[in-house]
Image (cartoon, grey):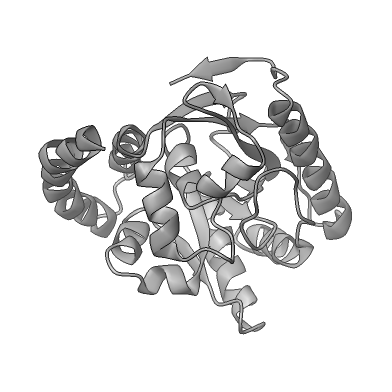
Amino acid sequence: MIFRVLFFIFVLVPVMIVVIPLQAIINALKLPFWNVLPRLFHRLGCIFLGLRVTLVGQPATGRATLLVSNHVSWTDIVAIGSVADVTFVAKREVGEWFFVGMMARLQKTIFVDRTRRSDAGRTASEMGAHMAGGNAVLLFAEGQSDIGTHVLPFRSALVGAAQRAMIDAGATDVMIQPLTIAYTKLQGLPVSRNERSLIAWIKSKSVKQNIRDILGGPVKDVTVAFGAPRPLSENDNRKQVTKAAEDDVRAMLVALNRGQKLPVAITN
C-alpha cells in the first residue's frame, strides 16, 4: 500500500499534470496520435492498481472494428487500455463522476443513457462515425458488470444499431471481434470464487468499497484475450452475430478460469 501511495504522489500526479492539458490539445486539434498518451496512462495505472496484464491474440487494426466484451470491474478499462487503442462505450453516469468523467472524455469515451431508448440512436451514430475512421470501439455487451465466473447474455440492440450506423457513416470492411477479460490469480495464486468479490464491481458493493478492495488488495493477474474477428455486413442478423460473439467470449473465459492457456500470449 505504501508503494502505491508513493507511486501515486511521485509518478501518477506529475504525469497527469502534463498529460491532461496535452491530451486536451491533441483532441481539440484532432491529431491522429490521440491514443498514445491514454495507452501510457493506462500502463502506469496498471502498476498503480497492481494489475499484471497478459495479452492473448491481437485487436484488429486499420479497419472499422466493434469489440464486444464481458465486464467484471472498472479496472477492465485500465487493463484493456494498456494493450489496445480503443474507444469505450460507457453509461452516462460515468461522465458525471468527478475526475473520472474528465479522463473518460479525454479518451473519447462515448456515453449512452440507458434510461432513454431514444438515446441508442445517438450513441450508435457516434460509434459508427468513430469506427468509420478505421478505429475500434469497445462495447461491454452484457450491459453490466458481473462476478467474472460466467458471461451474461449479450444485448444485441446496440450491436445492431452500431451495425447500421457504421454502414451509414461509410465504413467499409467492418469487423466484429470478441474480447474476453479474465482475472485469474491474486498474488500468483488462482482466484477462488469468494475472492472474486475483491475484484468485481457488483451491485451489493459501493464504489468506495470496491476502490478500497482494489487498492488494498494484492497483485492481480488479468488476461485480455482477443478472439478471431468476423466480417459484419449490413444484412447480417444482429442477434445471430451477437450470440456468436457471446459464445466465443464465454468459451475463452471458461478456459482461462480453468487455467488453460490460449495461444499467442504476450505478458506486459
208 above or below 252? below
Image location of residue 151, percent across then percent down: 75, 48
Rendering quarter of residue 82: top left
Residue 260 appears left or right of 23: right
Q: Left or right: 227 with respect to 91?
A: right
Q: How many tags in the picture?
A: 0
Q: Is residue 93 left or right of residue 62?
A: left
Instruction: Tell me if I can see residue 64 in this picture.
Output: no
Residue name at image x 42 percent, y 59 percent: 209
Instruction: Please give the name of the residue rendered at 66% of the width and 63% of the height, measured from the top-left corner.
Output: 143
Query: Is residue 92 at least partly visible in the picture?
Result: yes
Query: In the image shown, does 265 or 38 lie closer to the viewer?
Result: 265
Quarter assignment of residue 98:
bottom left
Compared with 7, 151 (above or below) is below
Give the answer, above or below, for where 177 lies relative to 227: below
* Residue at 28% across, 40% down: 37
Q: Is the C terminus in the top left, top right, bottom left or bottom right quadrant?
A: top left
- Extreme front residue here? 194
Percent coordinates x, y for residue 69 in the rendering:
65, 47
Quadrant the N terminus occupies: top left
Q: Where residue 246 appears, x then y in whole percent? A: 79, 47
Q: Quadrant of residue 190?
A: top right
Say which residue appears at 56% left-offset and 60% top-offset: 127
Residue 226 location (% of width, % of height): 64, 32
